[in-house]
Image (tube, rainbow, N blue to C red):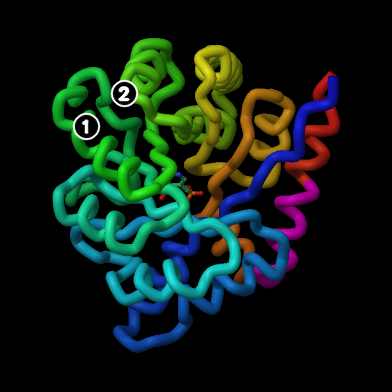
Amino acid sequence: MTAKRLRLGVNIDHVATVRNARGGALPDPVRAAHLAIAAGADGITAHLREDRRHIRDADMERLAVELTKPLNFEMAATDEMIALARRLKPHAACLVPEKREERTTEGGLDVVGQENMLAPRIALLREAGCRVSLFIEADEAPIAMAAKLGAPVVELHTGTWCHAVADRHDGKAKAEFARLAHGAAYAASLGIEVHAGHGLDYDTARLLAAVPDFVEFNIGHFLIGEAIFVGFEAAIAQMRAAMDAGRGSVV
Ligand code: PXP
């Protein structure tokens, strides 16, 4: 059986990080989103954080109106963000944990502990037509809870595995890869669409693409960094090739 082509969602948050470093309007993250789509991205992800450290409200408004491919609005499950998503109606809303002091999203959403808080918020997003995705760890308990909460999509957190690969902790990397592969298969068996993201680069994206249950990868920081050296379009094309090569190794 040949697994389906993986979708690539490009996260443009760090174009906004560079813009905000100087306080002006450039580089424009919305221009980067258009360029990413022209280069082969299947969708765009942007995270409007509570502290607006990168993407801002005006960016989200423009992305929601201008994009020709699906917008994945990453957000904390706060009343403010839910209201904004209900107004902007992005294709997808990905709920993530958020802490002010963190540098980036650390760990998956605590869906088991926050079931009662999440259920009505997921219902509000679904009512507005958003495809709800929960960013969680690749363990059976949160995946089963995501199914119970009626989330059509989960995004499995790949950060721990990517760190282990980068640090050459082979044993940990192997165990983390197995955890991701098992989580993806378990989620797919429950009828949930499975995405992955956080910390992926060419090598890890190629390796993980061999797991046939993944449908979409969301990748940001590495691509924006690579763009400095090879250009944004070339980085996206190379990522696309890495994902296709990995998927081609599925037997
Ligand atoms: N998916 C989610 C839910 C994230 O929070 C992030 C980071 O914002 C990403 C994917 C992309 O991670 P990275 O920027 O490390 O590629």
Q: Pinpoint residue 148: horizontal percent, then vertical percent.
A: 33, 17
Viewed as shown, does residue 161 lie left or right of 8? Answer: left
Identify the residue position indicated by label 1 in the image: 118
Residue type at tag 1: Leu
Q: Residue at x 58, y 56 (%)?
A: 43
Crowd around label 2: few <14 · some 14–19 · many ≥20 (10 Å)? some
User: Nearest the camera: 31 or 208?
Assistant: 31
Placement of 112 over or under 240, stated as above or below:
above
Q: Dot 1 lies on which element?
A: helix
Label 1 within 8 A of ligand 1 by Cβ = no
Q: Residue at x 18, y 25 (%)?
A: 114
Q: Which residues are magenta?
A: 229-241
Identify the residue position indicated by label 2 in the image: 149
Q: Quadrant of the N terminus?
A: top right
Res 229 visible: no
Q: Dot 2 lies on which element?
A: loop
Viewed as shown, does residue 50 lie left or right of 181? Answer: left
Q: Pinpoint residue 68: horizontal percent, then vertical percent.
A: 59, 67
Residue type at tag 2: Leu
**C-alpha separation, residue under disc 1 versus residue under disc 2:** 8 Å
Q: Pinpoint residue 82: horizontal percent, then vertical percent.
A: 23, 50
Q: Residue at x 68, y 72 (%)?
A: 231
Splitting the image into 4 quarters, where does residue 244 fall?
A: top right
Placement of 145 over or under 244, stated as above or below:
above
Q: In the rendered structure, which disc, 1 or 2, sits on the residue that comes first in sequence? A: 1
Q: Residue at x 69, y 61 (%)?
A: 235
User: Nearest the camera: 223 or 142?
Assistant: 142
Pointer 1 with pointer 2, Cβ within 8 A: yes
Placement of 159 over or under 10, stated as above or below:
above
